[in-house]
Every structure is written in structure tokens, then in C-alpha cells.
Image: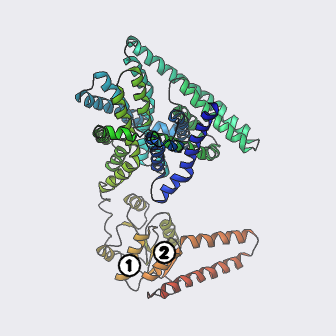
Amino acid sequence: MSAATDLATYKDALLVLGAAGVVVPVLHRYGVSTVLGYLLAGALLGPGGLGALTSYLPSLSFLTITDTARLSKFAEWGVVFLLFLIGLELSFERLATMRRLVFGLGGSQVLVSAIMIAIVAYALGQPPVASIVIGTALCLSSTAIVIELLADQKRLATSVGRTSFSILLFQDLAVVPILILLAGLEPGGAKNSLLFGILTALAQAAAALLIIVGVGRFLLQPLFRLVAQTHNPDLFIAATLFVAVSTSFITAAAGLSMALGAFVAGLLLAETEYRRAVQTTVEPIKSLLLGVFFFSVGTGLDVRSLISNPLAILLVTAGMLALQAMIIFALARAFGIARSASIETAALLAPGGEFGFVILTLALGYGLINSEETDILLTAVSLTMALIPAMAKLGRWLAQRHTPPVTAEPALPSLPAGDIMAKAVVVGYGRVGQLIGDMLAEHGVPYIAIEREPRIVTNARRDGKPVFFGDVRQLEFLKHCGLEVAKAAIITIHTEPEIDAIVKALRTNYPDLFIVSRARDANHARHLYEIGVNDAVPETIEASLQLSEAALVGLGVPTGLVIASIHERRDEFRAELQGAAKKAGTETRALPSRRRL
């Protein structure tokens, strides 16, 4: 029996590794996101997928998860390490600046959503206690999936990322009072001691956090300094895991979520010089364990429930998404979040979360809700979590459609008439454009710069720079740029379609203009020569040449020889790209690459 049990355990681990190493990469090859790939693999290999057919085909048991409870406990560590890494990216100072969103917006969302969902459940015939359970379970979102999606897109620092994280952080804090509330609602439970229980739990939670912060501030830095002095990477990994796991254990013992303790530990380490080393150590562990978490969520999707109660599950799913999205959008707007960010945040947080499973399962054990309703709700929550990647795309699309057009100060959109005597027009005034403008000014070449970002234009004008707001693709705007007297246009932006459109507009309206353009790579540079630039500077080639120059000079090769060879190689690349453009059948303006302005 023991051997059979061990074999089943190994088989489950093998299936998870197979999903991570084979199934998910295959799905990703066809455009399916990693998160959705894990969810689909879990749904397929879980008890509600192929597991539902094992009674008819016993051999399928080798391809299904046997112990979902054990898997879910193991998967929880993925969320723990995710919050640990998020803490490393923040600090107590940055978190303090978010307190209005965390406690204001986050607290309002939990309270309003729980009440509104409970009212809807009560109106549909649920008893008051069951309505409260449903409201508290469905008002919580998925921290793991939402944060992972935003982290993959490198958008945690955006308005959407900060707003979503603030709400999710308060939801995690609200879990403890919710669980205590359920215990007080238990038939025969000590309702009179509910307030005492809440106060006791809050005191325990505060004590746990104080211990972590107090001890961590004094011991974490010396600990990692001591470990780093050994120059043993294995010991560094062990110390990192010890800190993350021990702080999670302390908060779990105090009744808080394990992830919250890891998050606080990350905040403490973010203030030390070991932050990046710890992040590098934990990242691969987090990625694998988080994949196991998504996989375990997928195993909660029960196809049998969908077949037996399809209408009820779909109505709960649709109603939950719609109601939550409206509430979160309205509250975000009330707290001053931009319309586009409010739309995207609402779409991301409308689906349910992992704590919904905990609350519903616990409520079922207390007898606060019956098993049939629990199955419907659990399946609906799982379904909404599986829809999070799609909801993220929908939210971003809607946000882009409802983003107001960029406006500028009244004085910026048009150029002053009659006094434009610039010899060069710089298109784009980001970091590259600013450097080019400074170089032109240093050599006494009058110029103007065109930029589409109002903030950059405003700041540059305050500094006395000749920067104007506008779009050089528009013919009417081109007439005001002084290009009749200008000799050159320098395109510094990095978006290929915009570069191509600008080059075509300039070349069509000003055939004699000398055009120099930034290019993404050699292929893009070749294309730019085809459509009429005089000189293209591929980022990849130029970076390679500069690296070669620095390396050769550092190795002791005479500077003059190095510079000469770099210029020679640059001319070879230019001639090769221009020749390829001509060979393609497009007439290229073969003007010299250097011209006096």
C-alpha cells in the first residue's frame, strides 16, 4: 500500500513537471499564455477532466492527478514566493505612499463588493448567512494570477499595476477577519465572542508583523553579510529560503496568510544591498511553484459540474464578472484613477481568487452553505480565474478605446509663424533626441524638435529648448516646420511603423531633404533605404561597433587605428545595406552620408 501511495505521489509530480516542460511550451508555441497554459493543463489532467473518465477507461488514471489536496498545499508556496519577490521590488517608503489606495480603495472595494454580492444572493433566495458567505467569497480576486500577468508585462509600476496591487494587498489583509466572521456564524458557535475573537486575531497579526519587522531590521542584513562572506552560493540559497519560509510560518501561526509574511520579508530585504542577489536566487523557484499553483487551480475546473448545472454556473460567472467590474470601476474613478486605468483594473480584478476556495470550503464544513451550491460556486470561481488572461486582454483593449486623445497646452500645438530658420528638424525628443539637440546646439547648428508627448514638450519649453508639439506625418503641420529652409531631418523615435510613415511623408513632400533615421536592425535599415532615407543607423550594428571600439582600445590597440577601422566597417555596412535596397528594385537616393549643415 505504501509503495502504491508513493507511486501515486511520484506520478502526480511527473504530470506537473510534464505540464511545465512539455504541455505549456507547446501551447505557448500557438500563442497561449503561460498562465492560461497551466490552467488548461490542470483542467485537462485534473479530476474534472480526464479523471472523470477513469471509471470507463481505468488506464487514464496514469494521466490524471490523484491527490489534488496535497498538490494545492504544495502550490501555495508559489504565491508565497511571488509576494516575496514583489516585496523586494518595493520598500516601506514606497508602500507608505500607497496607503490611500491600499486602505481607502482596497477597503472600499472589499466592503462594497461583499455587501452588493450578498444583497444579490439574498434577492435570489439565499438565506442571510449563506448570502454573507457568498459575498465574502466572491469579493476577493486572484493575487497570484493578476500580479504574475502584470509582472510578465513589466507593468507593476504603472497606474494599473499600483491600483491592482493596492486592492489585492488589502484583500489579503481582509481574509483573517472574514475567516473569523465565518467561525462566528457557525451554528452553535460562540457568536457572543465574535468581537473578542476579531480583536484577538488582529492583536496576534500585529504582534507577528512587529516581530518580523523588528527582528528583520536588525538581523537580516548581518545574516546575509555573514553568508555572503562564505562565497558559497548554496548557503546563500539556503539563507534566502529560510527567511522566506520562516516569515511565512510566523504569519500563518498568527492567523494571517503565509504570503503576507513573505511580502514583509521582501520589503525588509529591499532596503539592503543583497536585494538583487536574493531576487536572482528566488526567481526560478517562484516560477516553477507558481506554475504548480496555476495548475492546481486548473484542476478545480469540474467538467461534470458544468454539464450538470451549465446554466447556473454560467449565470454566476457572468453575473460575478459584471457586478465586480462595475463596482471596481466606479470606486477607482471615485479615488481619482484615470478612466483607462480604471477600466483595465476592473477587468483584471473582476474574476474570483484563490481565497474564495478557502472561504467556501470552510463555510461548507461549518454548515453555512449546502454542497450543491458550493460546487456551483467553486466551479464558477475556477472558471473566472481561467478567464483572467482573456479579461486582461479585453480590459486593455477597452482601455485603449476609451483613452482620451492626447492634448497639449494651447501654446504648444502650432509653431510660431515666420521665424523658423532651423537647419535641422529633430523628430522625437526622448533621450536620443535630447542628446542630438544638445550636440547640434554645441556646434552652432540651429534646430527645432518635434515631439508628440505633451509632458516632454512642456518641460523642454520651460528649459528654453526649441521643442514643439505635433505630428510630422500631417501635411499641414509640415508646412509650419520650416522644412523649406531646413537641410536635414533626424528621426530618433524607435517604433518601426511610425518611422516608415514619417520617412514617406518627408520624402514625398520634400524630395531634396537630407533624412537620417534610427533603425531597429539591419533589415529595417535596408527597408528605410528603399523608401528614401539618406542614412540609416541600425541600433544593433551601431551597438556592436561601439562595443568593439571600447574593447579594442581597452586591449591596447592604438586609438587612431581603432577609430579608422570602425569608420571603415561602418561605411561597409552602409554600402551593403544601400546596395541591397537598390538590388530590391527601389531607387535609393545615394547622397553622401556626411553633409555640412
Circle 2 is placed at which residue position?
524
How many labels, in total? Answer: 2
**Label 1 is placed on what type of residue?**
Lys
Q: Relative to 564, is 90 on the left or the right?
A: left
Q: Is residue 530 above or below residue 297?
A: below
Circle 1 is placed at which residue position?
504
User: Rounded to the nearest whole Å, what is the CA distance between mark 1 and mark 2?
Assistant: 14 Å
Q: Nearer the viewer, residue 48 or 393?
A: 48
Q: Nearer the viewer, residue 186 or 165?
A: 186
Give the numbered dot on residue 313.
none
Residue 104 in percent (x, y) is at 37, 33
Provide the secondary structure element on which disc 2 rests. helix
**Label 2 is placed on what type of residue?**
His
Which of the 4 image quadrants contains residue 425? bottom left
Answer with mark 1 or mark 2, whichever residue precedes in sequence: 1
Report whether residue 347 is seen: yes
User: Would you call the spot at circle 2 few (<14 residues within 10 Å), some (14-19), or many (20 or more)?
Assistant: some
Q: Which of 24 and 467 is in front in this view?
A: 24
Q: Nearer the viewer, residue 584 or 304?
A: 304
Residue 381 in percent (x, y) is at 38, 38
Q: Relative to 323, is 575 on the left or the right?
A: right
Q: Is residue 253 above or below residue 540?
A: above
Q: Relative to 274, is 302 on the left or the right?
A: left
Residue 180 in percent (x, y) is at 43, 21
User: Would you call the spot at circle 1 few (<14 residues within 10 Å), some (14-19), or many (20 or more)?
Assistant: some
